Image (tube, helix red, strand yellow):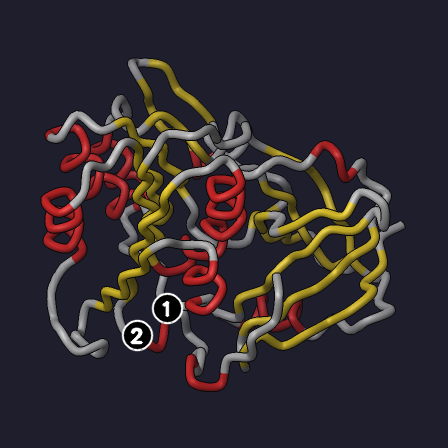
Amino acid sequence: MNKILSKIYISEDLVKFEIRTSMPVNDFKSGQYIILKLEQNKVGYPLPVIKTNVEKETIILIISVTDDYTRSLANLNAGSTNFELFGPFGCPAQIKNYGTVLCIGRGSGILPLLPILKRLRESGNQIISVLSASSKMEIILQNEINAASDEMIIQPDDGSSGEKGNLGQVIKQVFKNNRVNHVFVIGSAKTIKEICTLTTKYSIQTQAILYMGKPIQNGVHGIYRVTILGNTKSVCVDGFNFNAWYPNFDEMVHRFKETDLKIQGQVSVSNQINVPV
């Protein structure tokens, strides 16, 4: 049985849960995800596991409220057991001491970036994080990402952080100023294509995680299928993460059609609480 032990608001629309689970906590790895769904609802929602505690048999999940469905998940309270967890799914991210690692999170993709950053830090890497969204108000987990990074760059599209620009220009400047050994990019197909066009040009190994932050209906994961080296991979089952040098990006962007998923609820950065995650 799964039970929520604690619920803490990181900000108005960002909620952290500690959950005791009957699933084997040792099985969870960075880059994987679980599916959370309400028992009365057939729709599930993919979430990265932020942290595990083997002794307590607990996992930490963070819900970012972006729509009515995620709000219903965030309305669960401490003591609740009326939900289900499934997983873990996907292949773990490949973590080792690469040297200097550039980590890019766009929109909802910032959420699964955090556990990867922590593992990279534990492995001795120097970390440069770039967080991007349509506006600064949509960039979540700034305090937590900053604490796990050697340098953090905020790049909203509208210039609300002080300087207007696009993500590609920022990444080019990072490559110009630093010797980057490895790149992680998490976000939509459009974001992954943009970044990997640059990393291929600079011959920098890249891992990508296709993260849409969308509900999953009846366990159907087909929307996450991409073609890599002529072979179809279900990156939600084989792993959200994949070697980003080889996919058919044109097919991927056409399949998803969407640009980056925007956060509907306004996350107030100024009201964020410094909560250890």
Q: Does residue 14 lie above or below 95 as drawn?
A: below
Residue at image coords 64%, 44%? 34
Residue at image coords 26%, 47%? 191
Looking at this view, is 194 or 29 the one in front? 29
Q: Quadrant of residue 277?
A: bottom right
Residue 140, image x and y in percent? Answer: 43, 68
Residue topped by disc 1: 139
Residue at image coords 81%, 39%? 23
How crowded pointer 1 is (Cα within 10 Å; few <14, some 14-19, many 20+) is rated as many
Tags 2 and 1 in contact by the CB under 8 Å rule?
yes
Residue at image coords 43%, 30%? 97
Residue 57, image x and y in percent? Answer: 83, 47
Looking at this view, is 128 or 37 the one in front? 128
In the displayed image of the protein, which residue is found farthest to the right?
Answer: 1
Q: Secondary structure at mark 2?
A: helix
Amino acid type, mark 2: Lys
Residue 79, image x and y in percent? Answer: 87, 69
Looking at this view, is 39 or 77 the one in front? 77
In the displayed image of the protein, which residue is found farthest to the bottom?
Answer: 271
Residue topped by disc 2: 136
Looking at this view, is 189 or 78 the one in front? 78
